Image (cartoon, helix red, strand yellow):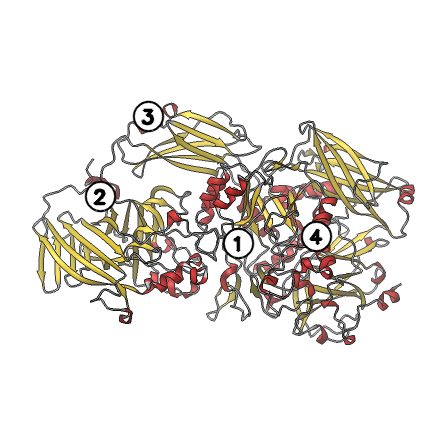
């Protein structure tokens, strides 16, 4: 038999036939796809296996996630953990011998032979991507293929990894069949055992399994040699054009499995809920593999099949530890009726479970299914198990239902990505992702855009996360061709595409978390998709089908699933009576850099319009890789940093987290719009709504806090009746414990904050975790009045000598202005310099990624065409209008013109972009009132900002403000940022986006103070009827943020640049390749007037008192 297999080897290269370029040849000797096999030796062992994996300290695990070089060891430790307590499964993870050849035709001759000398080869950890260990180079592209589009041919320059490792078969495995299982290899590979070819496979994200029993050396004899040849490019690469890094190698684990001669090879758990979910009818399809190919009835003559369901959520303690056998809740019996699945040749077992505990994202109740095979003597021959959940997925008119409830999908797209390892997974890092997702109120994930590591599904079952499982098919690059058809339209690709769909479903079919299968991503639409959709619907009617290609509304999808659709277009579809499917965005809110603006607009629609059921944000993590720079320090690298061409630069940086899972500020906004408790205050009623679908509020703790003008006036617990799912509770404002505090307050601004906490620890959160927090503004007890300085008898001294106007108050403050420029040249407090430069008008900001998106139509392009990036303000006039013992008033007129004089003339006004009139009123109290009138040219594009900029001494590094915070927020991304008084140092205000741009702002600021360690500094606030400002204080000036291409290139300035913006344009986020800031957050080029107040402060000064002391009440 071995010699026969050897003769069946793949054709030699010298025949001219390249099997890796033949779409009809996708596998050889590869076993049929099936569920992951655990190969238990007993029922007790299977139950303890799952019990131990569900009782881990997941919070400690998440905190132990590593993202640097330690992750290399961590990957090997994870591989060992995943097979722990499985006596007939062995991981081959470790250091293998490795050689990288330039092409499949240049690999070392007979390198797969057992006698080949590999001592000169280097060691490479498996699992890994070889590019992450110094071989070859990573390539990042979004759409374009990294090689010429010439299907099915791939480049002759095709890096080919040659691997060798050694293994022994344990003595305890004697007499058993040996399976070699590759969990995933990118992109195509061939394997040999002891020089004998044992198989070939494609599909970089799904397993390949081969039986190698006959090729292994006898037990106790020589070590066995496993050799693997991995091709970077194959015809399969044309189906794998996802928006991520192209990385190669054996990136998931390699396993040896030992099975008896007759064994359980696959099984499919199905349940049907009835009686208003009071019972579950269970069916389990079981396939048995017999080396002798005995008939189906013949196997039953010698063997029996049994299946049991255990409620392992109920642990029973005994002296020997955990005894889970009493948790058996139903025994399934072998059915004599044929399976409903067409062509199914296995066995059907069935039974009924009364009052099942249902699985949902809120209540992820799991049971353990155990299937055993016994011989005629009743001895256990084989045992398999998995965790299962009872839930019902169905559709009604414009609704996706889970257990009869129209759940809202609060989702995110997730690539497998590790900054040090690439596509290789670690247990703790997957746990970290899930902990963060759950803590930020996410209940769903889309596996973009391929099946992910098997452990990921187990964890999603356990944590409670709805999942779209997506086939490893994307052919986006074909969109760029005018003459080459998408593979979905070509019969030669049909088998390969269908195989990827079938293999995904067969591997993952028993996971409760999967509510939808996806046919892939951005691959056009055609007959091959229709065929795959038909196969899935015939195989599994218990889930819905998703596919966005072809316009997101084809017959191959059960939901309308567009990407980056605008809110108003979503609403049109939801209200279309001819569209009966629900709309769930498969991608939305493109979170590239400082982004995720407008997301609250989406959720205003989703929360209030039937037919809209949520979506999946793009995406979870910035896909940067660690790369050592010239300075020896590792930094986040993006497309092109490895010399990779073509590349799509930083378009891989779209995450809500940095690569090490540190949260972007935008994640706060996502948590807010996703929070399951909504609170509103209207017409004297405080309304609290439970947006959960299964959980009541019984296990939640509500508290309140009332603040006036930034000061906490009172706080306490809020006693509420239990609120049922999808229900509300209304409280009369006068009956709440905070009413009396509000009634006795004379504050100008009053805010009520309701906080909802989880009082007891969970799998994903410590006790006290904040589930939701909402701030509502209350009506003030006093009528609003403009902020006006009270006149005082404070004297000041002023003199005008040459170009200098000097205004001061003895031993406290001193201001020097230039009468030619109208600018403050120095401002000292108690002899210490405070302001170094300013105050000047400012209209420009460092473009964000979203500002740059859209080519010639982008905001950045239009701004630069209008020369806003070169805008400089020159002084047309400066006049002293008043100079007394109490006040000095100066008027300045600025003209905004391009820095270079070649763009027209000031004299004829042809190059004037903007005119600004400023009036300074400087009082004896030290207050400086600035009144601005800004008149931009009316043919300008929407403006980046309208405000002022000034520079203070670098020593003024303590920032305190009354406004929104504490984190970065912008006009179209501020709902989560509560109004309050916050304090931070300048360095920590900075948000280190990998590619710099406008960042670190704080919205709706009433006042801000910048002070040095002695407490000396400057106070700034709005004045008169001017609204709160957008504030920014940074060591990095606007020009520096604009100049640098990555955060490591940023150079701190010699001072702190401060911006106070009357208007600041939103940051957008509907997508990052077209202008996407909503109209209400644009700044049209029309006249603007606003006023600011500046004054000196010293140690012990209360900013609150300053704000209030000279305000008319």
Q: Could you give the CA–CA distance between mark 3 and mark 1, rounded to whole angstroms?
A: 46 Å
Observer-nearest residue: 804 or 1053?
Answer: 804
Name the quadrant containing residue 250: bottom right
x, y percentage for residue 577? Answer: 57, 38
The residue where tag 1 is placed is: 621
Q: Gap between marks 3 and 2, in whole Å? A: 30 Å
Relative to 864, 208 lies left or right: right
N-terminal label among 3 and 1: 1
Q: Which of marks 2 and 4 is nearer the N terminus?
A: 4
Q: Are the two marked residues, 1 and 2, in contact with CB atoms closer than 8 angstroms?
A: no
What's the residue at 40%, 45% (across, down)? 974
Structural crowding at the residue carrying mark 1, measured as other residues with C-alpha within 10 Å and reported as few (<14), some (14–19) or many (≥20)? many
Which residue sits furthest top?
Answer: 735
The answer to whether residue 217 is above or below residue 721 is below
Q: For the N terminus, give its image quadrant.
A: bottom right
Tally the numbered discs.
Answer: 4
Tell me if mark 2 has few (under 14), some (14-19) or many (20+) residues whose alpha carbon lies within 10 angstroms of its own.
some
Residue drawn at (83%, 48%) of the image: 263
Q: In this view, does 799 lie to the left or right of 612?
A: left
Q: Which of 412 and 1008 is in front in this view?
A: 412
Query: Decide: marks 3, 1 in contact (CB < 8 A)?
Result: no
Is residue 84 something one can see in this rendering? Answer: no
| For discs 3 and 2, the disc positioned in front in the rendered view | 2
Badge 3 marks a residue whose secondary structure is: helix
Q: Where is residue 78 in the image (x, y as percent from the top left)?
A: 64, 54
Dot 4: what SS? helix
Mark 1 or 2, closer to the camera: 2
- Residue position for label 3: 740
Query: Mark 3 to mark 4: distance in Å?
Result: 63 Å
Residue 501, label in figure: 4
Q: Which of marks 3 and 4 is nearer the N terminus?
A: 4
């Amino acid at each position: 038999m071995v010699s026969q297999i050897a003769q069946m080897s793949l054709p030699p290269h010298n025949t001219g036939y390249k099997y890796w370029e033949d779409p009809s040849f996708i596998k050889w000797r590869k076993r049929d796809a099936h569920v992951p096999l655990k190969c238990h030796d007993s029922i007790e062992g299977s139950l303890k296996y799952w019990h131990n994996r569900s009782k881990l300290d997941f919070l400690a695990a998440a905190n132990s996630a590593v993202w640097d070089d330690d992750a290399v060891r961590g990957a090997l430790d994870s591989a060992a953990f995943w097979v722990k307590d499985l006596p007939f499964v062995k991981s081959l993870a470790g250091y293998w011998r490795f050689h990288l050849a330039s092409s499949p035709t240049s690999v070392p001759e007979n390198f797969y032979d057992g006698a080949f000398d590999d001592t000169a080869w280097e060691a490479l950890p498996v699992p890994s991507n070889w590019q992450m260990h110094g071989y070859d180079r990573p390539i990042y592209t979004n759409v374009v293929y990294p090689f010429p589009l010439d299907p099915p041919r791939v480049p002759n320059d095709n890096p080919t990894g040659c691997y060798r490792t050694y293994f022994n078969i344990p003595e305890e495995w004697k007499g058993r069949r040996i399976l070699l299982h590759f969990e995933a290899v990118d992109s195509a590979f061939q394997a040999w055992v002891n020089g004998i070819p044992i198989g070939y496979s494609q599909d970089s994200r799904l397993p390949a399994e081969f039986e190698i029993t006959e090729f292994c050396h006898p037990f106790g004899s020589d070590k066995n040699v496993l050799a693997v040849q991995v091709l970077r490019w194959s015809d399969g690469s044309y189906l794998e054009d996802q928006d991520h890094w192209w990385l190669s190698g054996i990136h998931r684990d390699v396993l040896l499995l030992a099975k008896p001669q007759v064994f359980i090879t696959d099984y499919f758990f199905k349940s049907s809920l009835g009686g208003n979910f009071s019972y579950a009818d269970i069916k389990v399809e079981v396939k048995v593999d017999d080396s002798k190919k005995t008939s189906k009835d013949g196997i039953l003559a010698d063997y029996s099949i049994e299946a049991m369901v255990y409620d392992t959520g109920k642990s029973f303690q005994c002296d020997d530890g955990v005894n889970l056998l009493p948790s058996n809740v139903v025994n399934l019996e072998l059915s004599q009726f044929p399976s409903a699945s067409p062509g199914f040749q296995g066995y059907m077992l069935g039974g009924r479970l009364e009052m099942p505990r249902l699985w949902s994202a809120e209540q992820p109740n799991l049971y353990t299914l155990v299937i055993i095979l016994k011989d005629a003597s009743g001895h256990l021959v084989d045992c398999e198990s998995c965790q299962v959940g009872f839930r019902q997925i169905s559709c009604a008119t414009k609704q996706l239902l889970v257990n009869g409830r129209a759940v809202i999908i609060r989702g995110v797209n997730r690539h497998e990505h590790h900054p040090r390892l690439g596509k290789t997974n670690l247990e703790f890092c997957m746990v970290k992702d899930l902990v963060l997702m759950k803590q930020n109120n996410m209940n769903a994930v889309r596996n973009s855009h391929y099946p992910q590591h098997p452990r990921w599904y187990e964890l999603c079952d356990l944590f409670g996360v709805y999942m779209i499982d997506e086939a490893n098919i994307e052919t986006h690059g074909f969109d760029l061709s005018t003459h080459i058809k998408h593979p979905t339209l070509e019969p030669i690709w049909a088998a390969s595409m269908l195989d990827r769909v079938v293999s995904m479903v067969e591997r993952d079919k028993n996971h409760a978390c999967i509510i939808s299968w996806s046919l892939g991503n951005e691959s056009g639409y055609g007959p091959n998709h229709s065929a795959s959709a038909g196969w899935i619907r015939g195989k599994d009617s218990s889930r819905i089908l998703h596919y966005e290609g072809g316009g997101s509304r084809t017959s191959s999808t059960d939901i309308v699933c567009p990407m980056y659709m605008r809110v108003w277009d979503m609403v049109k579809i939801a209200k279309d009576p001819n569209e009966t499917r629900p709309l769930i965005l498969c991608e939305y809110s493109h979170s590239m850099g400082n982004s995720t603006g407008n997301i609250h607009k989406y959720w205003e629609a989703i929360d209030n319009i039937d037919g809209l059921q949520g979506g999946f944000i793009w995406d979870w993590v910035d896909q940067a890789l660690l790369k050592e720079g010239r300075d020896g320090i590792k930094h986040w690298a993006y497309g092109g940093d490895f010399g990779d061409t073509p590349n799509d630069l930083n378009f891989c940086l779209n995450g809500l987290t940095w690569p090490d899972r540190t949260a972007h500020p935008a994640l706060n906004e996502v948590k807010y719009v996703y929070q399951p408790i909504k609170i509103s205050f209207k017409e004297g009623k405080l309304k609290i709504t439970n947006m959960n679908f299964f959980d009541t509020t019984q296990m939640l703790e509500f508290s309140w806090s009332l603040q006036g003008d930034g000061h906490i006036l009172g706080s306490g617990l809020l006693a509420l009746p239990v609120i049922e799912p999808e229900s509300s509770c209304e409280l009369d404002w006068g009956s709440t414990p905070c009413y009396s505090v509000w009634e006795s307050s004379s504050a100008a601004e009053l805010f009520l904050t309701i906080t909802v906490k989880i009082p007891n620890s969970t799998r994903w959160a410590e006790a006290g975790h904040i589930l939701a927090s909402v701030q509502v503004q209350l009506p003030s007890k006093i009528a609003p009045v403009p902020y006006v300085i009270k006149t005082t008898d404070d004297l000041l001294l002023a003199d005008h000598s040459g170009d200098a106007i000097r205004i001061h108050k003895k031993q406290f403050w001193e201001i020097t202005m230039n009468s030619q420029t109208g600018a403050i040249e120095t401002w000292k407090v108690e002899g210490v310099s405070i302001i170094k430069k300013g105050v000047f008008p400012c209209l420009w900001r460092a473009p964000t990624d979203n500002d740059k998106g859209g080519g010639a139509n982008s905001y950045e392009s239009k701004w630069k065409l209008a020369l806003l990036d070169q805008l400089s303000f020159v002084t047309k006039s400066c006049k002293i209008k008043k100079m007394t013992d109490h006040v000095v008033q100066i008027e300045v007129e600025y003209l905004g013109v391009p820095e270079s004089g070649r763009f027209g003339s000031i004299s004829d006004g042809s190059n004037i972009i903007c005119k600004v009139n400023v009036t300074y009123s400087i009082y004896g109290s030290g207050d400086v009132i600035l009144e601005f009138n800004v008149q931009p040219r009316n043919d300008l594009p929407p403006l980046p900002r309208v405000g002022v900029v000034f520079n203070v001494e670098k020593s003024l590094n303590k920032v305190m403000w009354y406004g929104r915070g504490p984190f970065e927020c912008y006009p179209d991304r501020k709902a989560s940022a509560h109004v309050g008084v916050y304090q931070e140092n300048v360095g920590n205000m900075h948000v280190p986006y990998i590619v710099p741009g406008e960042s670190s702002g704080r919205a709706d600021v009433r006042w801000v103070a910048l002070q040095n360690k002695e407490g000396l500094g400057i106070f700034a606030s709005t004045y008169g009827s001017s609204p709160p400002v957008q504030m920014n204080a940074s060591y990095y000036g606007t020009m520096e943020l604009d100049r640098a291409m990555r955060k490591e290139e940023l150079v701190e300035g010699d001072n702190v640049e401060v911006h106070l913006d009357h208007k600041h344009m939103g940051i957008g986020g509907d997508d990052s390749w077209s202008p996407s800031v909503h109209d209400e957050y644009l700044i049209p080029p029309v006249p603007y007037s606003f006023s600011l107040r500046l004054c000196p402060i010293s140690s012990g000064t209360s900013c609150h008192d300053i704000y209030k002391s000279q305000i008319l009440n």
